[in-house]
Amino acid sequence: MTEAQADTPVSSTEHRRFSEADVERWRRDGFAIVPGFFTPDEIMPVVADYERLYGGRRPDAAEVMNRKGEGQIGRFNRHQFMNVDTLPYDGSVEMNLLSLHPALIDFARAALGVPDVHLYQSHTWAKFTGEADFDQPFHCDFGNHTLTVPSDEPCRRTIDFIVYLTDVTDAHGALHYVTKPDAWEVLGEGEVLANTAEQQAALKARERSAAAPAGTLVAHGIDTFHRGTNLTLKGAHRYTMTVGYKAAGNDQIGFHVWQVSADRNWAPILANAIPEQLAVLGIPPPGDPFWTPRTLALTRARWPDWDMQAWLDRAPGR
């Protein structure tokens, strides 16, 4: 954990990195772009991790493969998702705690209007020019986040974040999106499907670019139309992290299940995160009834490097 993270209360507005206007923009338009959310010092070690993990995967070819003709609708392909990994990461403490940053938790609470949130998605994404055809059709992300559809209640939706670790221009494959009001004007209010060529063309006529410098936070919802675009700059790369939060207890939403990765290295997180950060992963905070002499002893045996003093101080009988 960085010193700044350790000193930043999760629910405090003193160090808040977003405005009420950002929250309103996210609720109204489905997208809010906040430049400078993360400082260069915060993302520098994470970029170094990405270079170590993914830099060697740069393709030899500098041209985009399978490039389509102008005006055609994009499509999904498995090559677009080659350089994706899931928390916990084989990287620094800074990399492992970035999606648990108190400022992100604060933003998620404010946007969803709930006191407790849960981190349900955290993955890397490294793209390189020529590696794949990244051009996609307009879509909403709810299809692989829920078996139903986005709720009419904001508190039962999700807020998804994209952290720009490098500069993302249109030549670096900036995400393109359509605001909710624009999408509803051409598709109908509340519509989250666009399956025809005519609908795709109508959305493309309203698209905007999410190009922004490194350190930018892009907040969007699973009910907002967007699409990936191609990297066209020779030798370019695009490093981002995708982070998703939902209201705690919202079982309709899911993506990653942290328990299935128990054999991976959780030490950088358990040894450095504060209780509020661990709580958004589903670990009960100190004083929760879950913690009994038995569960405390077993947890300490399972994770010997985890400093559980805060939990022990509030153990039953203390």
Image (tube, rainbow, N blue to C red):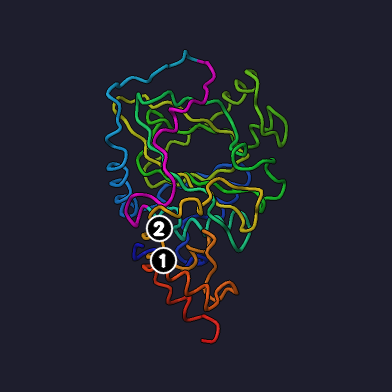
Q: Which residue is mark 1?
A: 303
Up-down relation of residue 268 to residue 50 (above or below): below
Residue in the picture at 36% in, 52% down: 95
The answer for how far apart the CA atoms under marks 1 and 2 are is 9 Å
Q: Which residue is mark 2?
A: 266
Query: x, y (%) of residue 88?
Result: 41, 52
Magenta stretch, main secondary structure, is loop
* Res 274 → quadrant: bottom left
Q: Which residue is nearer to you in this view: 305 or 81?
A: 305
Q: Residues within 10 Å of mark 1 (few under 14, many from 20)?
A: some
Looking at marks 1 and 2 on the same chain, the residue that comes earlier in the sequence is marked by 2
Q: Which quadrant does the N terminus fall into?
A: bottom left
The answer to whether 249 appears left or right of 245 in the picture is right
Query: x, y (%) of residue 89?
Result: 38, 50
The answer to whether 29 appears left or right of 152 in the picture is left
From which residue to which does the magenta span run?
Answer: 71-95
Q: Are marks 1 and 2 in contact (CB under 8 Å)?
A: yes
Q: Which residue is nearer to you in this view: 5 or 299?
A: 299
Residue type marked 2 = Trp
Residue type marked 1 = Trp
Up-down relation of residue 146 to residue 74 (above or below): below
Whether the magenta-drawn stretch holds residue 273 is answered as no
Up-down relation of residue 222 to residue 186 (above or below): below
* Res 145 → quadrant: top right
Whether the magenta-drawn stretch holds residue 81 is answered as yes
- Name the element at disc 2: loop
As drawn, which residue projects farthest toward the bottom? 317
Q: Which of the numbered marks, if any, corresponds to residue 119? A: none
Residue in the picture at 69% in, 41% down: 148
Query: x, y (%) of residue 4?
Result: 36, 64
Q: Residues within 10 Å of mark 2 (few under 14, many from 20)?
A: some
